[in-house]
Image (spheres, rainbow, N blue to C red):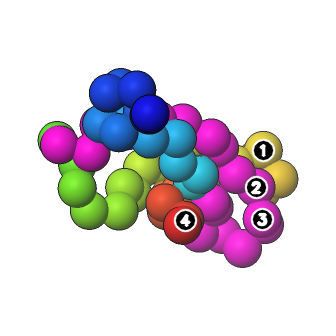
Amino acid sequence: MASKTADVRPVITLESSAGTGYRYVTRKNRRNTPDRMRIRKYDPVVRKHVEFVETR
């Protein structure tokens, strides 16, 4: 049986929108953020902050 925290806070992958293929792995609260996350984070390949989008 899955734990209660695993259901609410799944592990997600954030992929760079700059097309570099760089990814971050994080967790999100599914109750607060049911849609796909979009966060501006640093992409070391292009050496600037870009938008990262949740992939499935």
Give me the C-alpha separation between circle 4 and circle 2: 12 Å
Q: Position of residue 18 (x, y in %)?
A: 66, 69
Task: Please name the residue that numbered disc 2 is placed on.
Answer: 22
Q: Which mark is residue 55?
A: 4
User: Callout 1 environment at 10 Å: few (<14), some (14 to 19), or many (20+)?
Assistant: few
Which residue is pictured at 62% across the width and 41% down the height?
Answer: 25
Whether tag 3 and tag 4 are in contact, CB under 8 A, the answer is no
- The tag earlier along the polypeptide, 4 or 2, is 2
Identity of the amino acid at label 2? Tyr
User: Which one is in front in this view, the residue at disc 1 or the one at disc 4?
Assistant: 4
Give me the C-alpha separation between circle 1 and circle 4: 19 Å
Is 28 located above or below residue 54 in the figure? above
Task: Please name the residue that numbered disc 1 is placed on.
Answer: 44
Which residue is pictured at 44% across the width and 41% down the height?
Answer: 10
Task: Please name the residue that numbered disc 3 is placed on.
Answer: 21
User: Callout 2 environment at 10 Å: few (<14), some (14 to 19), or many (20+)?
Assistant: some
Whether tag 2 and tag 3 are in contact, CB under 8 A, the answer is yes
Identity of the amino acid at label 4? Thr
| Range covered by the magenta-colored residues | 15-31
As rendered, which of 17 and 35 lies closer to the eye? 35
Give me the C-alpha separation between circle 2 and circle 3: 4 Å
The quadrant of the rendering that contains the N terminus is top left
